[in-house]
Amino acid sequence: MVVRRHFFCSFYHPNTSRITDGGEYFASTYPAKANLVNHGVTFTWVHGQTNTAVGYVQLTHLVDDEEHLHVLVTGLAVSEAFRRRGFGRAMLLHIIASVPAKEIWVEVQEDNHPVRKLYAECGFVGRKKQETLTRRITIRSLP
């Protein structure tokens, strides 16, 4: 999916909320995935009135042969207490507005309709369906 790059994040209010480096929050909230922090950038949205982490957006980037920056959103989550209140959209639109990428890509499960709807409303358009490929490889024991 590719995003059109002309959105402005009107929901983001610096006086009441902020986006910070979310590596520490992500690693403490999801210890099994803590190693992912070293492979990209994680932003955490912190609610200004309660100083509570609302959610995170995780990105990784690629540079193509012509030196164009491409960004892949590898994670987007909002805490249950803050869902359906526009925070996911605000985080995504903030990334779209602030990342100087030629393209921003997302990958989403086909049956994840709420997130697919959010991405579509933020300007992402479907490009291709990617089938999941799983293979089992048996490796014999070394002597």
Image: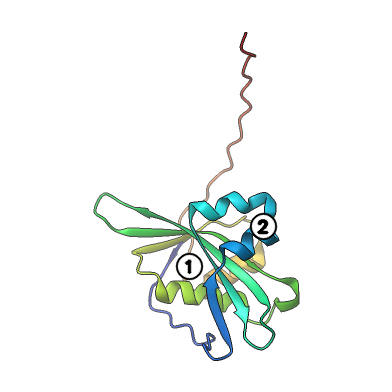
The one of 58 and 123 positioned closer to us in this rendering? 58
| Vertical comparison of 119 with 49: above or below | above
Q: Residue at x 35, y 69 (%)?
A: 100
Q: Residue at x 51, y 87 (%)?
A: 14
Query: Is tag 1's residue or tag 2's residue first in the polypeptide sequence?
Result: 2
The one of 22 and 101 positioned closer to us in this rendering? 22
Question: What distance separates the C-alpha of mark 1 from that of mark 2?
Answer: 17 Å
- The circle on residue 124 is 1
Q: Quadrant of the C terminus?
A: top right
Could you classify mark 2 by the number of other residues whose Cα lies within 10 Å: few (under 14), some (14-19), or many (20 or more)?
few
Q: Position of residue 9 (x, y in %)?
A: 48, 83
Q: Position of residue 48 (x, y in %)?
A: 62, 86
Q: Residue at x 61, y 12 (%)?
A: 142
Could you classify mark 1 by the number of other residues whose Cα lies within 10 Å: few (under 14), some (14-19), or many (20 or more)?
some
Question: Residue 53's image quarter?
Answer: bottom right
- The total number of labels drawn is 2
Say which amino acid is labelled 1: Phe
- The circle on residue 17 is none
Q: Which colouring convention does the figure follow?
A: rainbow
- Given contact means CB atoms under 8 Å apart, are the residues at marks 1 and 2 in contact? no
User: Can the viewer see residue 76?
Assistant: no
Q: Is residue 115 left or right of residue 130?
A: right
**Which residue sits furthest right?**
81
**Which residue sits furthest bottom?**
15
Name the secondary structure under disc 1. Answer: strand
Say which amino acid is labelled 2: Asp
Q: Residue at x 56, y 52 (%)?
A: 36
Residue at which label 2 appears: 111
The one of 7 and 142 positioned closer to us in this rendering? 142
